[in-house]
Image (tube, rainbow, N blue to C red):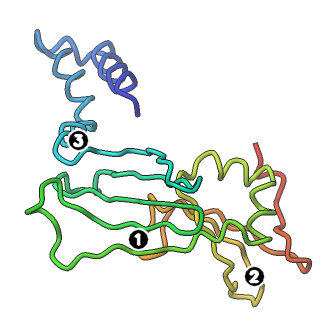
Amino acid sequence: MENVSHTLAGFALARGGLGKTTPLATTALVGGANLPDIDLAWSSFRSALVYMATALPGGTSRQVATLPHPGDPLRWEWIIADASSVRHGVIGALPFFDLAGASGAVLARNLDAPAVEALLKTCAGEVVSEFFRFPFATIEEGPDGGRDVVVRDARYTRQGRGFAVYSARLGADGRPIINRDECP
């Protein structure tokens, strides 16, 4: 959320009755509502590059992000994506917080596969494209022997699996079958 949203949530709690308990309750509620963004204080230590696109020589580009590691304010996740792959791993807020022996994972994006291109041109694919900052796709065998095109966001992925996932069954012609009820 943006800081404005955090601040408005704090004021809403105060106006809802919690602000009448002590003279500084509103201040405490607004300050507390902004605590989820305390990770911004670390940005000066490792130059946080949140969703930054950089141009490389030769006309290629890549996206770079550092994101707070869930439940651990001393470690951040890094993501570097180009047209063909997404690399991600963990880095400490300061060098002595780095995990010993930690290395990054590389995931093939596969966004140029015909089934994935067809999915991304549908209404469901438009929603995926708007939400997923670092998408990568796989074609997976379903339990019934059918095939699915599966798109994941690397921000929410651990070892190639994650919770930000969209899956569509592939028809006999290799094109995704989209339920129009799933479209906005």
Tally of marks? 3
x and y percent of residue 168 in the render?
74, 68
Tell me if label 2 and label 3 are in contact, CB under 8 Å. Answer: no
Secondary structure under badge 3? helix
- Looking at the rendered image, the quarter that the C terminus falls into is top right
Q: In this view, which residue lies farthest toward the front?
A: 58
Secondary structure under badge 1? strand
x and y percent of residue 21 in the render?
15, 15
- Mark 2 sits on what residue? 147
Name the residue type under label 2: Arg
The image's mark for residue 43 is: 3
x and y percent of residue 28 in the render?
16, 21
Q: In this view, which residue lies farthest toward the left?
A: 96
Residue at the spot x=67%, y=66% of the render? 111
Name the residue type under label 1: Arg
Q: Residues within 10 Å of mark 2 (few under 14, many from 20)?
A: some
Look at the picture and state if 125 lies above or below 111: above
Instruction: Give the image quarter of residue 71.
Output: bottom left
Looking at the image, tell me whether mark 2 or mark 1 is earlier in sequence order: 2
Secondary structure under badge 2? strand
Could you tell whether 37 is left or right of 129 in the image?
left
Look at the picture and state if 183 lies above or below 71: above
- Mark 1 sits on what residue? 158
Name the residue type under label 3: Ser
Residue at the spot x=44%, y=58% of the render? 155
- Cα separation, mark 2 vs mark 1, equals 22 Å
Q: Residues within 10 Å of mark 3 (few under 14, many from 20)?
A: some
